[in-house]
Amino acid sequence: TSGAHVPALVIGTGYGGSVAALRLAQAGVDVHMIEMGMAWDTPGPDGKIFCNTREPDHRSYWLRTKSKAPLNYFLGFPIDRNISRYTGILDAEDFSGITVYQGRGVGGGSLVNGGMAVTPRRENFGAVLPSVNAAEMYDIYYPRANAGLGVNSVDPAWFDSTACYQYARVGRKHAQRSGFPFVFVPDVYDWDYMKQEAAGTVTKSALAGEILYGNNHGKKSLQQTYIARAKATGRVAISPLHKVTSVAPAAGGGYTVVIDQINTNGDTTATKTVTADRVFFAAGSVGTSKLLVKLKATGALPNLNDEVGKGWGDNGNVMCGRANHMWDPTGSLQSAIPCSGIDNWAAGGAFAEVAPLPTGIETYASFYLSITKNPNRAQFSWNAATGKVDLNWQTSWKQPSIDMAKTIFDKINSKEGTIYRTDLFGTYKIWGDHLTYHPLGGAVLNKATDNYGRLTGHPGLYVIDGSLIPGNTSVNPFVTITALAERNIEKIIATDL
Ligand code: FAD
């Protein structure tokens, strides 16, 4: 309610926000979490909370009237369809040179992501977070994050026999025949549940194309892990469909936070003002960067330093498909949860997930999301004329990612006598180079903040999400975001409270 006072206010309910809320609550601090997306706890008219990728409806996209699927063509035909405008779960946020996909709702990106829970190789960590003690991360905080998230791995014997991972076995065969290391990738999906899906004894989720717009079963999103534990403390309240628009020093100490309440059409129905002793920015790389850049430029938080808005990267994401021979089918039944990758990071700067194409029909396609060592970094800036925050990423900055992904797929194509698919991202377009799933940076650790996420110039303000990470994690990012949040909140609780 307007006028209220809270000890700790957390902006956003993704990985960073959920870790902060749980640990603060356990330390005896009352926490209020503000989330612009929906609660995603109530079934729709079809009895399901989430829709699947084959039949996207109003629940799929954040305030769009047409779906905007990452893979937007098939056999050269556009596949996007009209939907009614709604505060749906997946935001395809357009900047001039890139579309940034993000989860919207209580649980943030954990609602929409593939659940791939990857700890970077230790030898790569120094490049990921140069100012962080690696020994502490690998001895304490990565294990804590993996436990808290419920990370587990596919049973290799089942993987070898189940129809739903034929596509991944084809991916393994092709990787190994070209001499690339093939690795299993841990996930937060409940693998026992998936086994039962395959056996036909439970309602299908991963095996029914549920990914991107939420999973109704099987996937342990933050709602089932950190947020459930945070709520169980009795000290954490969550306000969905509330969007923070301003944070500024309050006259009597602490901060004044301005919050718009919105309806499912995205319209503001009320504006509330509360005060908080401490504010944790956990709105995701884009959400936190946009807020901080605006608040610095408009004078609400004048003491923020010039690093705010800088160091943003796309984790080197680039997608592609390969056309297999007719004797190498990838299967009509594909688990929507990826479980494997091709590791050519050291030699070629690319780690490629063997991704599903869960269309329900045989496509003879192998599909990959590559994470690459793309060195380009973009900056957010305030545009006073439009009243919006711009990002100066350019599409051509993906070229290093394409070159790195090619170190894997040119070789596989030449070995297998196959070609790239040209029908998945347009007509005669090979590379999905217009998007990222992994926005990182914008309020980089030890630059915009101190080495634990304390924002410079404004005591009591913290950043605790993916914006702390300078643009790349060498693998999928959420385990690193969670582990870093565990490290930082421990220090903050011990020294600041
Ligand atoms: P987020 O999880 O993005 O949470 C931020 C929250 O803040 C959101 O809920 C947002 O709605 C809310 N918010 C933003 N602004 C405001 C505001 N002003 N007021 C109130 N609330 C606000 N990563 C992996 O590691 N493995 C994967 O398999 C994987 N697959 C992915 C697949 C897809 C389709 C996508 C989109 C992402 C995927 N990711 C994956 C990336 C991963 O989900 C993100 O890196 C992660 O969610 C980022 O965590 P975060 O805490 O920084 O922020």
Image: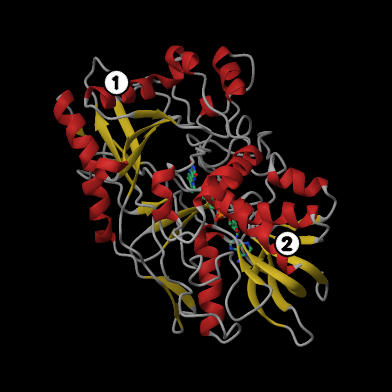
Q: What x and y, as percent, mark residue 376?
A: 31, 62
Q: Residues within 10 Å of mark 2 (few under 14, many from 20)?
A: few
Q: Earlier in the sequence, mark 2 or mark 1?
A: 1
Q: Residues within 10 Å of mark 1 (few under 14, many from 20)?
A: some
Q: What x and y, as percent, mark residue 280?
A: 66, 65
Residue 80 in sight here: no
Q: Is residue 101 left or right of residue 263?
A: left
Q: In terms of depth relative to the viewer, which is nearer, 131 or 26?
A: 131
Residue at the image point whose x is 70% and y is 50% from the top: 39
Residue at the image point whose x is 57% and y is 28% from the top: 205
Relative height, residue 333 to residue 454 (above, below): above
Disc marking residue 315? none
Q: Is residue 363 left or right of residue 248?
A: left
Assess mark 2: CB under 8 A from ligand 1? no
Q: What x and y, as percent, mark residue 139?
A: 57, 43
According to the picture, the residue beneath numbered tag 1 turns out to be 173
Q: Amino acid at mark 2?
A: Ala
Numbered label tally: 2
CB under 8 Å between discs 2 and 1: no
Residue at the image point whose x is 44% and y is 44% from the top: 122
According to the picture, the residue beneath numbered tag 2 turns out to be 494
Q: In terms of depth relative to the viewer, which is nearer, 25 or 423?
A: 25
